[in-house]
Image (cartoon, coloured by chain):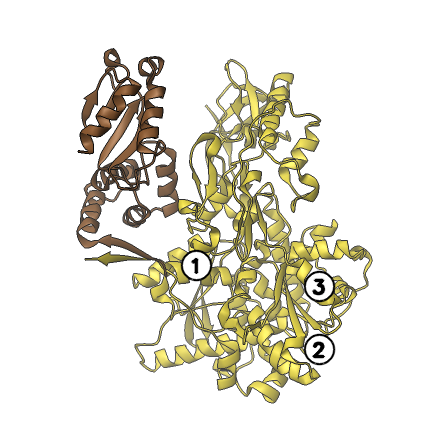
Chain colours: A yellow, B brown
Amino acid sequence: MLFISNNTGAKMETVKITIDNKVIEVAKGTTILKAAKEAGIHIPTLCYLHLHDLNIENKPAGCRICVVEVEGRRNLAPACVTECLDGMVINTHNIRVLNSRKTVLELILSDHPTDCLICAKNGDCELQTMAQEFGVRKIHYEGEQSTYREDTSPAIIRDVDKCIMCRRCEMMCNEVQTVGVLSAVNRGFMSVVAPAFEMNLDHSECTYCGQCVAVCPTGALTEVDHTNQVIRALADPTKTVVVQTAPAVRAALGEEFGMEPGTLVTGKLAAALRRLGFNYVFDTDFAADLTIMEEGTELLDRLTRHLNGDKDVPLPILTSCCPGWVNFFEHQFPDMRDIPSTARSPQQMFGAIAKTYFAEKIGVKRDDMVVVSIMPCLAKKYECQREEFATDGNPDVDFSISTRELAHLIKQSNINFNDLEDEDFDNPLGESTGAAVIFGTTGGVIEAAVRTAYEVHTGKKLEKVDFEELRGMDFIREATIDFNGLPIRIGIAHGLGNARKLLQDIKDGKSSFHAIEIMACPGGCIGGGGQPLHHGDSSILKARQKAIYREDAGKTIRKSHENPYIIQLYEEFLGKPMSEKSHHLLHTHYFDKSKEIKVVE
Amino acid sequence: MANIKLSAEKLDELKAICKSFKNDKGELINVLHKAQGLFGYLPAEVQEVIAKELSVSVAHVYGVVSFYSFFTMLPKGEYPVSICLGTACYVRGAEKVIDEFKRILNINVGETSPDGKFSLACLRCVGACGLAPVVLVGEKVYGRVAPDGVKDIVAEYTK
């Protein structure tokens, strides 16, 4: 028996295989696909998805693109699920294998629309790339094509004619997010991925987190595109168009222009938005600082009441910046909707302040102002359409477009993004601190809150603003922060499945946290459903996360309550955090959206 | 808030079925089988309850219901008519028998007549090939059915 040491020093059992004439030794249980990767051999895959750093894997062995020849076996074996056995001889690229793969791909394409030129995923589609790499010039199989109605929701479009049944979306929706909206239904040629009873997404419990869109290899799941509405607003001389951009966008947008993952493009982003014709180029980070003022005050208020013996005060307090998360608890845990902070998300705080405080300042009527947000998120599209965030039918945020949509808009407008000189955001709603930018990653919101809450509560200056114990990619993290003798217990979860675990603990009375941060997407907003597609490479998310912390470290002001324009906003307009005006403009309430089984006599 | 309607009595019976399988999600198909026995079909409400009891998503339950042809979401008629389409029945003209039922009842296969009396379904070999073509109405078996005999069968139940 063979053994090799893994990095913990323990010995593990291994097997010896021959792959493309190369003899290698791999741990027992390793799939052929992983063994090939270790040997530097690329086997093409389509349905398979592995987000290594997040421990997310999809391997239904459905598409059969990854087949290889195993000597002594009659049929080709799917590399993604076949485990290496001792002595196995594997051919990954002989003529039989290549022909089979091409045949499989042609069969998939025979039931796929060929409208690539006008498809939203044109140029970013894994099926298209594969057809190109395989050199498919003719589809030898003609037959019936399955058709299904298109389903448009406030944020996501399902066009299942383009679905190849890879089941990645189903895995994300069920196993990672535990939302359980998508499932394969019907049988054979008629099978599609759909919500229960084939209802439309907007009737389901979909949170619009967009993780299905983030992993879809084709154009079957895409975002609702709002760029044309934005172009129309920009072209209307009667409108003052104000733009805000979320923290995670600056750490990812560069990828769309060929830059290395983790490149920060904050300055180019501001410059590009100005070139596009926005009248005021602002930053959602400003509103993130504002969120900390409101949410941090709410945390301290609840904590103080709790310490003074008030048994009715709901603890832990849960963050409420993430609209996917808000949708999740409104559907799945409506009886606990008094626990999350009532603070609106930064996007909505920005909209509310822009259309009141700022509109008054520049003397523009609410109806003549259009607020556009650039978000890494698809749930934001739904959030800005919620009725409670509108005044007389006029929404606080008119349109929310994703990082991907912004990249398209910049390309359409003939702007040479890579050569743009860095520019700054406008003031007053463009100034922000390091605490705001880390809102873009898991752990960031709570770290920002701690920086402010610590100083407000203790009256002392925080010597070290970096809280390494709150950072990282582990799905559920916990830490205790010493507030001058008062231990504050903090929980962090990203991915809704992990959020569910923490929520269930609270429900069961097993939670001892004072505050919990939740972000719906794995990695937080850096891994949002509106970001440039990672195509299964989770190192991209890590690079974005590092970039976010780099931006924070480089800021002169790193605590929200020290933002001079936030101080000015309170002095001139809001009064103090949780004032009546703040409540009206910056806080919200939640709804019970659960289904109830009604008994009729 | 979407509301689901189910009588208290039926709801209890359905929950008892789930409980008899220890609310085990691995027993979903068995639970659905029993539930269809109780209701005659599997309306959305029933699937919602089963999903909740077995802690699985409704989409998953619907996925299973829509996959297996045995499960139906349409209520069956008072007299469910099933026509065998096994090889023997098929070659002896079962298809013409179906067409005649469709014409007389004015419904398609898988449908139920508006008055709720008849529903039409196809099935595979009932093991009575010597009697082909075979038609079942409820539990009663009719053998060697010819298209012109269909109206007499229907008449038996419309008296």
* Residue B42 falls in image quadrant: top left
| Quadrant of the frame with the C terminus of chain A | bottom left
A109 vs B108, nearest the viewer: B108
User: In the picture shown, does residue A444 fall above or below A99?
Assistant: below
Which amino acid, by three-letter code, is at mark 2?
Asn
Q: What distance separates the C-alpha of mark 3 from that of mark 2? A: 25 Å
According to the picture, the residue beneath numbered tag 1 turns out to be A328
Q: Are marks 1 and 2 in contact (CB under 8 Å)?
A: no
* Residue A423 falls in image quadrant: bottom right
B102 vs B6, nearest the viewer: B102
Q: Which chain is home to disc 1?
A: A
Q: Residue at x 28, y 47 (%)?
A: B46
Q: Secondary structure at mark 1?
A: helix
According to the picture, the residue beneath numbered tag 3 turns out to be A232
Which amino acid, by three-letter code, is at mark 1?
Phe
User: In the picture shown, does residue A319 fall above or below A150?
Assistant: below
User: In the picture shown, does residue A421 fall above or below A393?
Assistant: above
According to the picture, the residue beneath numbered tag 2 turns out to be A427
Q: Which badge, 1 or 2, is on the more N-terminal residue?
A: 1
